[in-house]
Image (tube, rainbow, N blue to C red):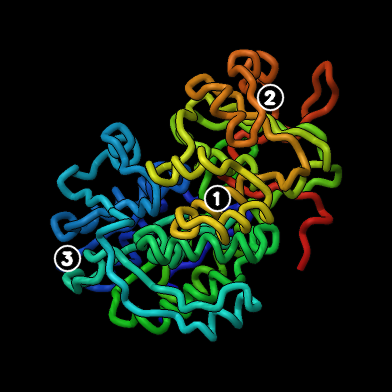
Amino acid sequence: MTTFFSEGSPQTEIHSKDLREIISSVFSEMGNRRQVMALPPDFTRFPSRAGEITCLLHEYYGEAMTDVMPALGTHFAMPDWQLKKMFPTIPKDLIRIHDWRNDVTTIGEVPADFVSKVTNGIWNKPWKAQLNRLLWTQQHDLIVSIGQVVPHEVIGMANYNKNIFVGTGGADGINESHFISAAFGMERVMGRADNPLRQILNYAQDHFCQALPVVYILTVIGENVQGQQVIRGLFIGDDHDCFYKAADLSAEVNINIVDERPDRVVAWLDPEEFHSTWIGNKSVYRTRMMINDGGELTVLAKGVKTFGEDPEIDRLIRKYGYRTTQEVMQFVEKTDDLKCNLSAAAHLIHGSSENRFEIRYATENISSEEIESVGYSHMDYSAAAAQYPVDTLSDGWNEDSQGRFYFVRNPALGLWAHRSAIKP
C-alpha cells in the first residue's frame, strides 16, 4: 500500500493547473486502465473541489472512465442543475445513482468483539460492511474515491473509506455507523482522526477489500487572506497513512479555536447547498463546542424546505424532533420505527443542543409551526437577514446594537470550538 502524492501546509495553494499536472503524473505511473470508476461526493460537498478533480480524471482517462457514482449515502440524488454545476464536462450517461436501501451487498462483518472493544462496550454487535453492488462486480480495474478531509460529527474527520462504506453503503452499515458515534459521544469524535468508527472502517478495508482497486484523492480546503477557498493539501494513495496525513493538516486548517465563548452565534446556509435540516444542522454540531451555556444559535436557512433527505427519515424527524441524547435513547429502546432507522436517531442527537443553548431556524420555505414542532425556535427569514446582512459580516466576531456575536459563513468547512473543549 502506497501514498503516491502528499503535499500541503496551512499556507499551500494548489491551483487548477497544478491539479491537472499532478493527476496526469500520478496516474500515468499506475499504467493503463481499461475500466475506471469515480466516486466523488455529492453536491453537499461542493467546496471539496471533488467535482473539478472528477472532470480532470475523465479528461485523463477518456472512454476508459465508464462510471461516475456520487457517494450519496442517505442523501437525495443530484438533480440536473447540480450535476451540471459540479461535473460540467461529465456526460450524464456516465452518472450512476446510489440507492442505499436496495442496491447494496454485504461484503463482510467486523466481529462483535472488535466492535465492542473499540467502542468501550457501547455497541456489541458485528458491523456489516456494505457497498453498492457496482463496486463489487470486479469489472473495474481502478476505482478512484475523491473527497475532502474536514472535521465531521460521525467519523471525526470526513472522507477516506467513509466515502466507500457510508457514501456507497447500505442501510444497516450506515444506520449503525451513525448511531455508534452518536452514542459514543459526538464531542469525543469531532475533529479526531482516530476514533471507534474509523477503527471499524479501517478493519473492514483491511480485511474485506484487498481485491478492490481503490485509490483515494483527498483534499484539504482552507481560505486565503482574500477569503477565497483554496486547496491547502492534496493527498493521493491507497493506504491509511495517506488519510492520516490529510487529517493532520485539516486539524491545523479547519479547526477554529476561540478563547471566549460567544453568547450569540449566527450561521449562514448557502441556499444552493443546504435544502434540509439533515444537512443544515452542520450549523449546530460544528459550532456547539464553542457556544456558551444559555446562549443562542441563529441559522439563516433560506434554502431549507424539509427535514430529512429521505422520506422515511423526514417522517421520523417530524415525529420525534431534535431531543436530548437521553430522550432519543429512550425512543430507540421503546419504538420499532426509530430502532430500525438508527441513522435518524443519531441525527436527532446531532441536531440537539442538549438543552444548553437555543437553536433558532430562520426560514422562508418551511413554516414556523413545523420548525417549532421539532424542538427549535423560528424566525422569519427576511427579519433575520435584515438583522444579520451576511454580505457585510466578517467571519468570526461582529458587533451590533445587541452586542458582540460570532458569525460562521459556511459551517461545512470546519469545526469551531472553545479552547477548553479541545482535549487530547
Instruction: Identify the mark nearer the N-term, 1 or 3.
Output: 3
At label 1, the amino acid type is: His
Instruction: Identify the mark nearer the N-term, 2 or 1.
Output: 1
Element at label 2: loop
Q: Is 129 placed above or below 252 here?
A: below
Q: Residues within 10 Å of mark 1 (few under 14, many from 20)?
A: many
Identify the disc placed on residue 35.
Answer: 3
405 horizontally vs 3: left or right: right
How many angstroms separate mark 3 from mark 2 (CA)? 48 Å
Closer to the camera in the image, 82 or 250: 82
Q: Tell me, yes or no, whether the two marked residues, 2 and 1, touch with CB atoms within 8 Å.
A: no
Q: Which residue is located at x 61 percent, y 29 percent?
A: 372
At label 2, the amino acid type is: Leu
320 horizontally vs 97: left or right: right
Residue tagged by mark 1? Answer: 347
Q: Which residue is located at x 55 percent, y 32 percent?
A: 269
Q: Residues within 10 Å of mark 3 (few under 14, many from 20)?
A: some
Q: Which residue is located at x 74 percent, y 49 percent?
A: 289
Identify the disc placed on residue 393.
Answer: 2
Q: Tell me, yes or no, whether the two marked residues, 3 and 2, touch with CB atoms within 8 Å.
A: no
